[in-house]
């Protein structure tokens, strides 16, 4: 059996561990078995559906524009996800779409402009998907923590405003704290890569039989791009959210909690 | 040390005339002011004014709109409609950053910003020297050598005095005090009152928000009574206390919270 093609049988075999986890949860009455089963089924259906759609996009002779439309759709869905997780922030969808779109565009420019990957449907979609997946998680965190930090420190912010600081100056320490929380996990992950866990891209390549050094180099490039895009989107969204909580005349206007 | 790179901005707001100059325009004037929050009207004022007296107190029951009225004065709050004027100038047309350096605010809860006591003072005046820090602390009765202490270590009373010192470094013409002594013990509350009395002696106007009638008698020349989001009476403190209209009588008699 090729390591790069495990078939549905391989997937079924991998369920053994999930079944064991469900059994363990049921025995200890943790109430998690339904969540685990639902997540497993949902992931399988989603990925098979996506795989089918990707088959059309990546098919020989498929127009390249389909790949770019796919990336655009990922940005829109990603922005909707971010906006949905921090509903109290007005105008977050547009802000997140701009931040994610900019980060993906910049990353793809680096990837293809500097020749890290050859330009083509088989590289555009997976690269954008990987970057967006990480950026969305950090962006959601950046948006939510920015609102929470500003809400928690309203008194300090109004003291600074009353001392004649501008709106952006008055929230800066709290936006910084929110962004450290959002970007921190990616920074930590980058620090410990290879020591504690082998990252996904590298693992996939090793399983597919690629030379370890090639796998490491590719993983490193991917990791740097992810770190950059996570940081850029988080900063853009964190600062943008803070601006939306401030008026042009430097007042703090907190939305009602969602 | 905190990263405070902001520079002093030129103050482009009117300078309030001294407290004794009662012939000049009103210190603050409110015309057709409505403040809505969450679709609810929390303050409605057809016309009210805070004159050029040394000290004015805004009194009224809890939730009546006293703090909202005070926050309109340095534009931490903006009216949904209507006009607020400072020495005749429409606040909506003024630079709010410069305005707030002339119209300072001391809040109910003593707030220590991050860093040391000196870092806190630099938030009000980034360019101050170590000597300025000592002078600012002594001015509010704090030890001159407190500058290097983490601000978080201060007691509530010390923090409130630090807050006052921080606000005074912007050289304000008006100090707004939003229940500034209600979180303090009587000794520290008396200290704040004495400090503010010292400021009004030097032509700084004080506008207190309080629900404490004894404090009203001690600190204010004039009273403005706000009940259920409306200014129902204003005038010299003696007049407000001795000849209250029925709505104010209910408040003075403790029938309103």
Image: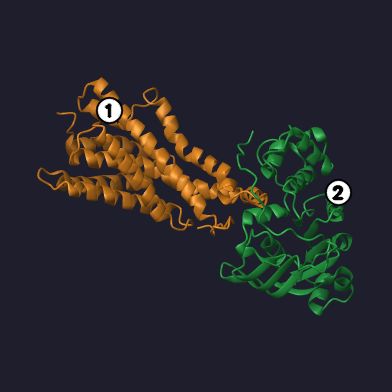
Chain colours: A orange, B green
Q: Residue at x 32, y 40 (%)?
A: A106
- Residue A9 place in picture, x, y as percent: 18, 37
What kind of element bears circle 1? helix
Identify residue for label 1.
A218
Considering every residue shown, the one lying at the far left of the view is A61
Report whether A180 appears left or right of B249: left
- Compared to A181, does A208 lie above or below? above
Cα distance, mark 2 to mark 1? 67 Å
Q: Nearer the viewer, residue B7 or B65?
A: B7
Q: Name the quadrant containing residue B176.
A: bottom right
Give the residue at x 61% y 63%: B93
Looking at the rendered structure, the number of numbered marks drawn on it comes to 2
User: What chain does mark 1 sit on?
Assistant: A
Q: Quadrant of the N terminus of chain B?
A: top right
Residue A27 visible in image: no
- Does B184 sit left or right of A155 as displayed? right
**Can you say whether B78 is above or below B123 in the image?**
below
Q: Is residue B189 above or below residue B53?
A: above
Mark 2 secondary-structure assignment: helix
Residue B83 or A183: which is nearer the viewer? B83
Mark 2 — residue?
B191
Question: Residue at coordinates 67% horizontally, 49% vertically from top-left?
Answer: A163
The answer as to whether the residues below labels 2 and 1 share one chain is no
Marks 2 & 1, CB-CB < 8 Å contact: no
């Amino acid at each position: 059996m090729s390591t790069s093609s495990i078939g549905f049988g391989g997937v079924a075999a991998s369920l053994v561990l999930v079944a064991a986890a469900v059994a363990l949860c049921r025995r200890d009455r943790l109430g998690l078995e339904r969540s685990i089963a639902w997540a497993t089924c949902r992931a399988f259906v989603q990925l098979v559906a996506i795989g089918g759609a990707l088959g059309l996009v990546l098919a020989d002779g498929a127009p390249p524009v389909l790949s770019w439309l796919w990336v655009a759709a990922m940005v829109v869905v990603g922005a909707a996800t971010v906006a949905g997780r921090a509903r109290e922030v007005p105008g977050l969808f547009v802000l997140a779409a701009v931040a994610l779109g900019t980060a993906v565009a910049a990353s793809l420019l680096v990837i293809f402009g500097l020749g890290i990957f050859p330009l083509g449907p088989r590289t555009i979609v997976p690269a954008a998907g990987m970057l967006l997946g990480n950026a969305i998680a950090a962006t959601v965190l950046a948006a939510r923590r920015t609102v929470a930090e500003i809400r928690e420190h309203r008194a300090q912010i109004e003291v600074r405003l009353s001392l004649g600081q501008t709106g952006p100056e008055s929230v800066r320490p709290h936006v910084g704290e929110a962004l450290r929380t959002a970007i921190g996990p990616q920074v930590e992950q980058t620090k410990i890569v290879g020591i504690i866990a082998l990252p996904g891209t590298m693992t996939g390549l090793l399983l597919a039989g690629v030379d370890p050094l090639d796998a490491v180099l590719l993983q490193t490039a991917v990791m740097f791009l992810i770190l950059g895009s996570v940081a850029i989107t988080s900063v853009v969204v964190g600062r943008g959210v803070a601006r939306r909580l401030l008026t042009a005349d430097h007042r703090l206007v907190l939305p009602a909690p969602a | 040390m905190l990263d405070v790179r902001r520079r002093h901005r030129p103050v482009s707001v009117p300078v309030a005339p001294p407290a004794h100059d009662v012939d000049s325009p009103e210190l603050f004037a409110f015309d057709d002011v409505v403040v809505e929050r969450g679709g609810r009207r929390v303050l409605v004022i057809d016309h009210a004014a805070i004159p050029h007296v040394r000290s004015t107190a805004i009194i009224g029951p809890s939730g009546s709109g006293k703090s909202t009225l005070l926050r309109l004065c340095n534009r931490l709050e903006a009216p949904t409609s209507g006009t607020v004027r400072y020495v005749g100038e429409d606040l909506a047309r003024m630079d709010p950053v410069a305005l707030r350096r002339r119209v300072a605010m001391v809040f109910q809860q003593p707030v220590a910003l991050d860093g040391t006591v000196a870092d806190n003072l630099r938030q009000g005046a980034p360019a101050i020297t170590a000597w300025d820090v000592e002078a600012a602390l002594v001015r509010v009765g704090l030890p001159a050598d407190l500058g290097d202490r983490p601000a978080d270590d201060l007691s509530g009373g010390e923090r409130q005095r630090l807050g006052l010192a921080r606000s005074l470094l912007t050289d304000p013409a008006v100090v707004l005090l939003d229940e500034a002594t209600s979180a303090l013990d009587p000794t520290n509350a008396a200290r704040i009152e004495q400090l503010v009395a010292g400021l009004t002696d030097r032509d700084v106007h004080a506008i207190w928000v309080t629900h404490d009638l004894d404090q009203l008698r001690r600190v204010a020349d004039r009273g403005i009574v706000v009940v259920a989001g409306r200014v129902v009476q204003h005038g010299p403190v003696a007049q407000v206390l001795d000849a209250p209209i029925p709505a104010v009588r209910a408040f003075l008699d403790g029938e309103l919270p």
